[in-house]
Amino acid sequence: MNYMGIDHHKQYSHITLLDERGEVVKSGRVANLRRELEDFLYGIKEVRAVVEAGRSSYTMVDVLDDLGISTTVAHPKEVRAIAKAKVKTDEKDSYKLAHLLRTGYIPEVYKRSGENRSSQRVLRQRAFYVGKQTSVKNRLRALLAQQREEIRGEAARVENLFTEKGMRVLVGLALPEREEKMMGALLKTYRHLEERISETNALVDDLYGKLPYARLIQTVPGFGKFLSVLVATEIADIGRFADVGQFHAYAGVIPSTHSSGERSYHGKITKEGNRWLRWAAVEAVWPAIRADFDLQRYYERLKRRKGANSAKVATARRLLTIIYRMLKEGRSYIPYKR
């Protein structure tokens, strides 16, 4: 067996090939083209490869899979922790990866299918648009809050400013000239984002029908169809998490810990791992506590003790706990009855 470590970049990769004894068989820079990779591997049999997870790493993974080469995707941060080096070059990094693969010390990450990655890209784009749309809403509210009493009162008569009726009210407000132009620009941006979000509705509906996880997750308060599909896609396989703590760590909703001697300090959440899963859980908190008495009581109790922000994060973590247990057991959510 030969072991191939790939230090992957956008235009090229540095590849080191080791044999069973750890001797370098071949090493060099290769353009990220299939024919270049085939030329590099010409005459070499029985190859296993490893590449660090990155923005474009899967382009290399897909080519290697097509060539029939078993490929491991490594966790970049954990690789650095295992094999620290003061001198860092592409050649040394690729050698390090090949050596860790040969000795069985590669910290692996979940290897996603091409279909899952494609769905991820579209759903994350939609989540990006939703986040920007929320920012536009907040700027519109801030602009209204700075207007005179009559204008604020007129806007307050509409229950939801972001319906067609609400939009007509916003357009008709007698704002000063500069503020009117700002309002117009914000409304134009809002509508543009709304159109971009609507373009992904067909994919969301299609994935919802195909993903059993999504249909289970939607039974949890706060998770509509889109958030359910997003979370199901990001999880992909709940079986890859040994326990709920590992799932929380993956979502980055566990508190950071600093220990020295007999003292331990728990700080803010790590925010490491899958930020889209974390974003979805936090987004679901407000509708969840409005819909479920048990979650509302949990949030209010923590809010009194630790403040609103800590309570919101803790409630997001509880929602993820609920989702983890539901998916593990293959059952839907049973709400608390007053």
Image: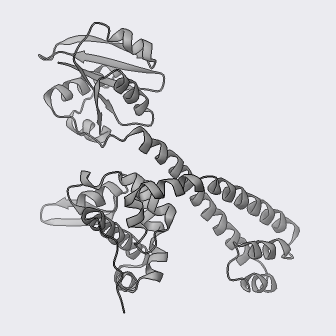
Quarter of the rendering occupied by the N terminus: top left
Q: Give how far across and how far down residue 296 sits, in percent.
A: 40, 84
Instruction: Check the image and report above or below for 338 versus 205.
Output: below
Is residue 87 at least partly visible in the picture?
no
Q: Is residue 246 shown left or right of residue 189?
A: left
Q: Residue at x 75, y 63 (%)?
A: 187
Q: Residue at x 80, y 76 (%)?
A: 169
Q: Give how far across and how far down residue 114 sits, in percent.
A: 42, 38
Total numbered labels: 0
Quarter of the rendering occupied by the C terminus: bottom left
Q: Is residue 156 shown left or right of residue 284?
A: right
Q: Give how far across and how far down residue 86 sits, in percent.
A: 27, 29
Determine the image quadrant of residue 220.
Answer: bottom left
Is residue 244 at least partly visible in the picture?
yes
Instruction: Check the image and report above or below for 291 versus 93.
Output: below
Depth check, front residue: 328 or 52: 328
Q: Residue at x 19, y 65 (%)?
A: 264
Q: Is residue 18 shown left or right of residue 316?
A: left
**Colouring mode (rainbow / by chain / secondary structure / one colour):** one colour
